[in-house]
């Protein structure tokens, strides 16, 4: 059974909406954890999908959080109409400074009125001078404050959860999750009650910290807006909810890349009239910049003299080991194809994989600045498959564990510009069979995914929801 089928079966066959504390129905929070537990069991055999080289010790992480928590701490006490919660995975260089690639258009327009709460994910915050925006604090501050809170929540009807775990073989520490949720709620109650805040913005509503923030914002009559940060499709657990389970930890509005999302998101999460298409400032910016970037143009001109085809490969942690094996096999059979492999993270030793000479780990040019110069883009099920089309570059999706079909087939249906392969020899054949395309035709296909004129769209959406 696929993870989405598991979630649907559970929600339709169990009274999960009855699992509650005095304040809310907790399945809103737990459904994501149960879906992930089931997926981990099916795909990884119950083992962790996180590479051990990426995981720091708890001690190191704790020290990092303490150090980060005091970053710009004086701004914690200031008032801002808009508060944005995001993380460093969205950081890119924009307008010569580090900024958030999904919120940069908003920051350009409303930055002076906005506080950004940044999760640096086990790394240290950059120097303030490196950032485009000037008003930052660290989410580590909220993590530290959470440690001081003590709650002991009683969950009614938790026998339903126990039955689900027995029936499907999943295991979730739901008591710890719900207790941590309410610790965060107390932290955000303290934070928001002193603010004159019109709205909070999150880059992902199903993060536990963000769910607590949303719950607290609702209690304080503060609007909540989510920025789409990745693929939203019919197999995304967070946006496909099979019956009413409450909306206490759900966003009031969502700003999405394109209109296609309105046909996918369940009304049990958010009504379609609260979905606003704003596009993507960063993609618009890179496309403008790529026409003038002499350094990148020279780099790819040199490569073109050495290889018949250039393909850029975007990876994901969940499937990276299998993807590497797949690419190595394909590369060994045709050394006139160059594979530019772009990992999700660079903090592991890739030399151990003994790649063929026609596979390079690209550390200096990211996906966005390279894909427009490549013949093809390869991935399993990354959001980059949709983004590549905006640059006029076709896809080949490597259908490892059927993940490409499950996650992208309903979105990327134009066979001329997106092909699916299951074996390395099929990949090599598909690369060699792909003719030169008219990039403008590919870009036209992408327009339903990304609405143009990001800043204009943001201002219109803000007016529509009475935030300006």
Image (spheres, rainbow, N blue to C red):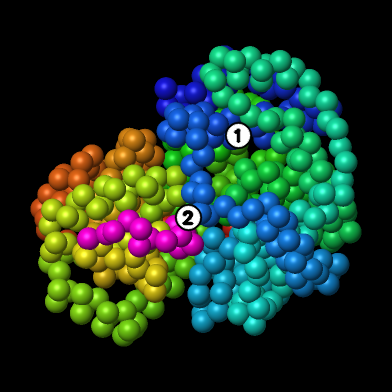
Q: Is residue 105 left or right of residue 72?
A: left
Q: Position of residue 394 (x, y in %)?
A: 25, 56
Reply above or below: 403 against 429. above
Reply above or below: 210 against 9. below
Q: Position of residue 369 (x, y in %)?
A: 37, 71
Question: Is residue 59 part of the magenta span, yes or no?
Answer: no
Residue at 65% from the left image edge and 32% from the top image edge? 30
Q: Is residue 466 left or right of residue 274?
A: right
Q: Which SS class for mark 2?
A: loop
User: If the image is split into quadrants, where does the N terminus sit?
Assistant: top left
User: If the image is split into quadrants, where does the C terminus sit?
Assistant: bottom right
Label 1: which residue? 33
Residue 198 versus residue 364: which sits nearer the camera?
364
Q: Position of residue 296 (x, y in %)?
A: 31, 79
Q: Which SS class for mark 1?
A: helix
Label for residue 360?
none
Residue at 65% from the left image edge and 70% from the top image edge? 125
Residue 98 versus residue 393: which sits nearer the camera?
98
Label for residue 257?
2
Give the extent of the magenta segment: 344-356
Residue at 32% from the left image edge and 61% from the top image edge? 341
């Amino acid at each position: 059974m696929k993870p989405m089928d598991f979630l649907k079966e559970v929600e339709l066959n169990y009274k999960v909406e009855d699992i509650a504390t005095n304040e809310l129905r907790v399945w809103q929070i737990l459904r994501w954890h149960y879906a992930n537990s089931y997926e981990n069991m099916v795909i990884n055999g119950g083992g962790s999908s996180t590479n051990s080289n990426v995981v720091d010790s708890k001690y190191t992480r704790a020290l990092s959080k303490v150090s980060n928590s005091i970053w710009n701490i004086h701004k914690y006490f200031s008032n801002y109409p808009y508060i944005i919660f995001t993380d460093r995975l969205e950081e890119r260089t924009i307008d010569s400074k580090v900024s958030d690639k999904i919120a940069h258009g908003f920051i350009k327009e409303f930055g002076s009125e906005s506080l950004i709460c940044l999760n640096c994910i086990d790394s240290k915050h950059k120097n303030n001078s490196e950032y485009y925006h000037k008003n930052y604090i660290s989410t580590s501050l909220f993590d530290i404050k959470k440690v001081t809170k003590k709650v002991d929540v009683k969950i009614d009807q938790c026998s339903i959860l126990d039955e689900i775990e027995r029936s499907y073989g999943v295991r979730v520490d739901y008591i710890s999750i719900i207790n941590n949720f309410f610790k965060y709620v107390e932290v955000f109650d303290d934070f928001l009650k002193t603010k004159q805040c019109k709205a909070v913005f999150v880059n992902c509503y199903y993060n536990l910290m963000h769910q607590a923030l949303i719950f607290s914002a609702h209690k304080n009559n503060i609007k909540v807006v989510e920025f789409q940060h990745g693929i939203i499709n019919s197999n995304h657990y967070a946006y496909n909810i099979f019956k009413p389970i409450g909306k206490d930890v759900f966003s009031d509005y969502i700003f999405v890349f394109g209109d296609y999302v309105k046909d996918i998101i369940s009304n049990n999460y958010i009504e379609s009239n609260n979905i606003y298409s704003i596009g993507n400032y960063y993609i618009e910016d890179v496309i403008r910049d790529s026409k003038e970037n002499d350094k990148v143009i020279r780099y790819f001109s040199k490569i073109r003299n050495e290889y018949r085809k250039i393909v850029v490969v975007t990876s994901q942690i969940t499937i990276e080991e299998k993807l590497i094996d797949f690419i190595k096999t394909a590369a060994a059979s045709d050394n006139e194809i160059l594979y530019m492999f772009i990992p999700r993270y660079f903090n592991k030793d890739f030399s151990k994989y003994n790649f063929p000479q026609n596979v390079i780990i690209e550390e200096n040019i990211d996906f966005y600045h390279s894909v427009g110069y490549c013949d093809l883009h390869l991935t399993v099920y990354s959001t980059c498959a949709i983004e590549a089309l905006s640059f006029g570059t076709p896809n080949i999706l490597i259908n490892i564990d059927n993940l490409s079909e499950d996650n992208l087939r309903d979105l990327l249906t134009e066979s001329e510009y997106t092909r699916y392969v299951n074996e390395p020899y099929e990949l090599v054949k598909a690369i060699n069979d792909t003719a030169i395309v008219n990039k403008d035709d590919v870009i036209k296909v992408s327009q339903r995914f990304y609405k143009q004129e990001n800043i204009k769209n943001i201002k219109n959406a803000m007016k529509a929801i009475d935030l300006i």
